[in-house]
Image (cartoon, grey):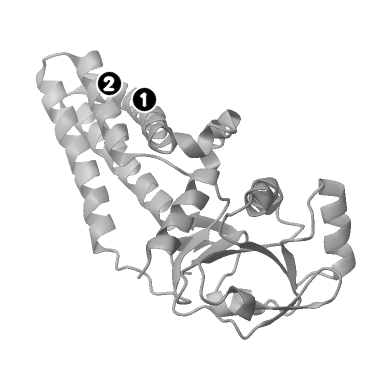
Amino acid sequence: MDGAFVIGPLMIAADRGLAILCIAVFLGLTALAGRFRFPQLSAVATSAVVVGLVMARIGYVAEHWASYAHAPLSILAVWQGGFSAFAGLAGAAGTLAFRLGRTRALAIGWATLAAAGGLWFTLQALILPVSYGPFPYNLALTTPAGAPLPLDRFRGRPFVVNLWATWCGPCRRELPMLDAAASHPGEVPILLADQGEPPATVTRFLTGAGIGADHVALDPARGLSRALKVAGYPATAFVAADGTIVQLQLGELSRAALDDGINMARKHR
């Protein structure tokens, strides 16, 4: 799947998979250095990673504070992603300096950190932009009540389509946020397209969760899943006014990521 690594039932977004790889490279290099000459370096490497991750999260939240201000507890939802590489590297470098002082081990530690950081930016640069193509406006969707819901109504303006299912835990967690965003006056339209479930199942879930049906659609044949080549949920497509899918976000979405995707769809030319 474009933009993600799929390992059995596990789906990992590509950027998070690369981050895990680079952290593993850093820990491997520091362990190697510790084994041969600098044991103090390997002893502090884990704390550098922990502080780096915390600082990376703080940096991202600071950059997107407007998206988090209305729900500060969502800052703790780290599984949704949202980390600043520069802030993380700075935090890890500062931790190494604090723990190791002006020693040869510090120079080696910074070198291993630079190698891991360089690998991250290199791989990011080598990954070609994904082309998702035009949005499939021709698909037949319905409202939960069974009325036709033509996708042509979204032509000529940016919009968002979220693919979800009632059995999907991450979908259930993000739906209230998406429903609230979709209900806000003047926002880019957000369509919550259930994939392959009977109307009664969807209606029962919406009623129990306190989510209105105004922005919900049913895709009984899972046509959107096939058209977007989505094998797991949730998945969120951001569509520009000309019908180009500018981004396909895989996995649970944060409000900050939603705002970023909407801005990308708005600015696309």
Q: Nearer the viewer, residue 56 or 192?
A: 192
Name above or below for residue 45 compared with residue 241.
above
Q: Are marks 1 and 2 in contact (CB under 8 Å)?
A: yes
Tell me the number on the disc at residue 162.
none
Q: Position of residue 77 (x, y in %)?
A: 56, 36
Figure check: 230 above or below 82: below
Task: Answer whether residue 74 is visible to the viewer in this image.
Answer: yes
Q: Secondary structure at mark 1?
A: helix
Q: Secondary structure at mark 2?
A: helix
Q: Residue at x 57, y 55 (%)?
A: 187
Report whether 34 appears left or right of 189: left
Q: Residues within 10 Å of mark 2 (few under 14, many from 20)?
A: many
Q: Which residue is mark 1?
A: 51
- Between 248 and 102, the residue placed more toward the observer is 248
Residue 51, how many percent across, how many down?
A: 36, 25
What percent of the width, then of the height, locates residue 86? 27, 37
Residue shown at the point (55%, 77%) measured from the top left: 155
The residue where tag 2 is placed is 95
Q: Quadrant of the C terminus?
A: bottom left
Q: Earlier in the sequence, mark 1 or mark 2?
A: 1
In the displayed structure, 36 sits above or below 141; it is above
